[in-house]
Image (cartoon, grey):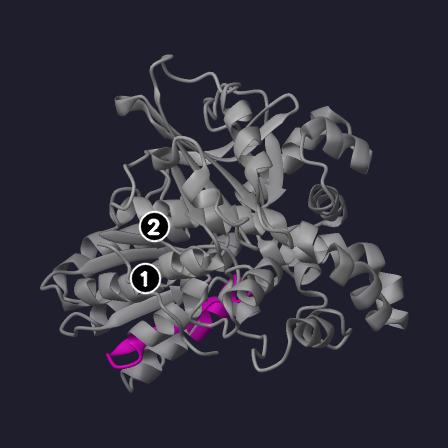
Amino acid sequence: MTFYDRGSELESLEAAAASSNYEFYVVYGRRRVGKTELLKTFCANRPHIYFLAAQESEHRQREKFIEQVADYFDDRIPRIDGWDNAFDYLGEVIADEQIVIVIDEFPYLIEENDSLPSYVQSFVDERLQDTDSMLVLCGSSVSTMESEVLGHKSPLYGRRTGQIDLQPFSFKQAREAIAYDLEEAIQSYAVTGGTPMYLTHFDYECSLADNIRTHILSPTGILYNEPEFLLRTELRNPSRYMSILEAVALGHTTPNEISGGTGIDVGPLSKYLQTLRRLRLLDREVPITESRKKSKRSRYHVADEFLRFWFRYVEPNRSSIEEAPDVVLEGTIQPDLPDHVAPTFEDICQEAIWEVIRGSEIEPYSKVGRWWYGEHEIDIVGLAPNDDRILFAECKWTNEPVGYSLVDNLRNKAENVRWGPETRSEQFALFSKSGFVDGLEQEVEDNEKWLFFDLTKLDSVLSSVTHD
């Protein structure tokens, strides 16, 4: 797989490796997000031992680890009975070395022996600290890494010298890989999301429809069963979790709606929702003007665009896809795709707002997100509490140019947002796939308060040089 972006993460790792002291880094993030590619790129031109743990017995894992260490140093493989002795051996052989040791999928080792963090703690305190070497623990089980490695109850708490929580690519970052024009790139991103493994499997010399047909709707395609495989690696019984993800992908976003769509009572449902959030498969959202801890107006959405696409179109149509994938593509997916893309477009527009804030092209806002209350909803609201300033924005993924009605509609909805004093300063923005009716930008009342983004302007914002 081609290695894209990740410049800041590589710089962080390389600066640590170049330091005159020992380093202990923790790298973690959702599956398929590119952790292994990042670490292999980092290790490529420097002395290193890279050990990839597997789901097998503790004895066999330890055996393989020792074999790999001994092989690197051209040493006779010692007989070692426990992980404490294994790390003692590692400490002996690296005593006079400057080397990077990577243990990937560290949670697999903890599954077989929950004392592993204590053994690593002893290694860091008694061996690693006296060297110029670097230890990197990596894992895809975010909950295990956060509790057993980074958590305050972990023996390793406070010992790391750096950490990287690797995230999927933003749309701007993903553009390097998506070789379509902006409109089709947005549609493609709504299918693959920013997970490197998904977006790099598409062949951008082919149409989006062909990529969907080949890689997602074909039973032999690598992405056809991917979500089911992903859930089975994380959960012993994924069926209920899959039904929840399908319900959310199909538009059931509140706990009551999810309960009605799945038949799972609201009480037990909260535990499932919490697990899916912990796995970073679901996100919980509250209106931007409310406290995340106190608000009872939660909405949930699938945290990954590819999973949202898969649970919306593939999982409910498995039988039809097996028999006639083109019928599903042309009869179900393509007519409905604009509705699927619209929320992704909102997220991309939100990303653009942050870009123009960072570029000082508009006054700053400290919080940006969605707002809703009853029947009223605004795609993007930005808050600047210290300056009593608020931004309202709407995003339209439609085939018609935006006209005066949306301007009036947004002004009216803004009056329902109870935030700040009556003298608050208001700013407005419109994003439109198909541009704006002639003269709108010049003729709109209080023009100085309005920003207009068509695809050309959006492309400029999201293709610009990253701001410091």
Residue 125, position as x, y percentages in the image? 21, 52
Q: Is residue 448 magenta?
A: no
Q: Residue furthest left?
A: 20
Of 8 and 336, nearer the camera is 336
Q: Give the total number of marks visible in the rendering.
A: 2
Residue 62 counted in the magenta span: yes
User: Horizontally, is 158 left or right of 195 in the view?
Assistant: left
Q: Which residue corresponds to the image point at 13% horizontal and 73% vertical from the top-left?
A: 96
Residue 6 vs 231, above or below: the answer is below
Under mark 1, the amino acid is Ser
On the picture, is 448 further left or further right than 209?
left
Query: Which quarter of the image is occupied by the C terminus?
Result: bottom left
Secondary structure under tag 2 reads helix
**Residue 44, how many percent across, how many down?**
31, 80
**Residue corresponding to mark 1:** 464
Disc 2 residue type? Glu
- Which of 310/347 is in front? 347
